[in-house]
Image (cartoon, rainbow, N blue to C red):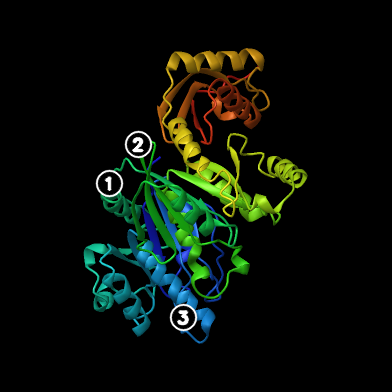
Amino acid sequence: MKNLPIVALIGQTNAGKSSLLNRFAHRNIAIVAREAGTTRDSVTARIDDRFLMIDTAGLKDAADDFEASIQDQIADAIESADLILLTLDSTLYVSEKDKRIAKMALKSQKPVFLVLNKSDLKGSLDIFEFRSLGIKPDNTFRVSATTGYGLDELKNNIYKIIPNLKQEKSETLKLALIGRPNVGKSSLFNSLAKKQQAIVSSRQGTTRDVNRVEIKFKGRDLEILDTAGLRKPGRREVGIEKFSAIRTLAAIEESDICALLVDATEPHSKLDQSLAGQIVEAGKGIVVVLTKTDLKTHEEIEKILDDLEYDFNFLPFAPVLLTSSETGANVTKLFDLALEIDEARHTELKTSDLNKVLNQAILEHAPAGLKNTRPKPKYIVQTDTCPPWFVVHGHGLSTLHWSWKRFLENKLREAYPFVGTPIMFSYRDDKVDKID
């Protein structure tokens, strides 16, 4: 799976950014309300597996530190984005705030689209009224998040821009350190850099909360990304932490493999599970790194591992590494695991071998479907790597029960471990066979 470009929705409050995100995502992700300023934190959605769309909080007067942090968040979104969608209410004349945020966007030298929302309303102004923003008419789009008017044209033009983005290919294996604040990411980052003697280069990241170091390990170039800690939205503090979510998501997308750090001294939380889910959804390799294990007894570690196995039962393929940056225990084993996971992500299987697994699964457990249907998987092929992607062809597969899909994945993993990597399935449905 390729790294996805980032498309940022920016603009004043109540311009309809959240409604646009929900329209693009085909589901309610962002909270929509008539009250201006509903969106306080960035909300991100994966759109058609083609790009990430970020809905930022609206621009308001910085009456306090909290509102100042929202403006910082917009600035950070502009810096992170590959394409910027300046979203305005087309029924309102251009204000000084609109001009200010347009200037911020254009100054970034990123592609900027002007999105005039609410264009279905009678009071919608002529495009001429928005000329003072300095955005070309060819990059101006009339839309309605309420009715869907103009969104196909906008999406098609986004697709014209993003194929030219992030096309650079690198043989460097990128490993991102992901987790909550104070779980030991920076300590592990420093320990990894010090333990590895063959350091090629070390540099401060171009973003203010991602540090990077490049190393060579067993003849392979690796780059380690140290990200800012991510808290629950309601617990994020004023300032940099308010928009660290953007950087964390961007780091996940940029990386090949993510090390999800879990603190052995603190109970793991739903946020840890959420981060793991985001890593898997992005199709990235994953290893769970239990930090600060030197502060726990053997019996306590065993209890933590049992809890991890239970709470992360959707990650049976993810290896767990016990580390201590203080003592250096198992730190460099992360490099070995990264290489092993990378090899699994590039696995290519023969169609004949895949169909042996499929036929065996059918023999052991007949495919279950909805009432009065009988799904018939016929054959399976692999269509992609990084992550490995498999397409099952057959009849009536739209009725196939989720439990049998999971059973098939388990059978495939029994034959081919795919350590540390999610594997994806698609089901091509020809027709449904009804039982008389």
**Looking at the picture, does residue 14 appear above or below residue 61?**
above
Is residue 428 depicted above or below 276 in this figure? above
Q: Pick whichever, 395 or 12, lies toward us.
A: 12
Q: Closest to the observer: 403 or 420?
A: 420
Residue 295, image x, y percentages: 69, 54
Please tell me whether mark 2 sits on a helix, a strand or a loop. loop
Quarter of the image where the C terminus is located: top right
Evaluate whether residue 147 shows in this view.
no
Provide residue 117's location: percent of width, then percent of height.
Answer: 39, 67
Q: Label 3 vs label 2: CA separation?
A: 51 Å
Do the residues bearing badges 2 and 1 touch, measured as CB atoms within 8 Å? no
Which residue is labeled 2 in the image? 219
Q: Badge 3, how many Cα within 10 Å: few under 14, some, many 20+?
A: some
Label 3's element? Answer: loop
Name the residue rendered at 62%, 55% in the picture.
Answer: 271
Kindly identify which numbered label has been placed on residue 168: 1
Name which residue lies at 29% across and 54% down. Answer: 157
Residue 322, placed above or below residue 100: above
Q: Residue at x 53, y 46 (%)?
A: 331
- The residue beneath circle 3 is 60
Neighbours of disc 2 within 10 Å: few (<14), some (14-19), many (20+): few
Q: Residue 133 is drawn in which quadrant? A: bottom left
User: Which mark's residue is nearer the viewer, 3 or 2?
Assistant: 2
Q: Quadrant of residue 387?
A: top left
CA gap between label 1 and label 3 equals 37 Å
Q: Residue at x 28, y 47 (%)?
A: 163
Q: Amino acid at mark 1?
A: Glu
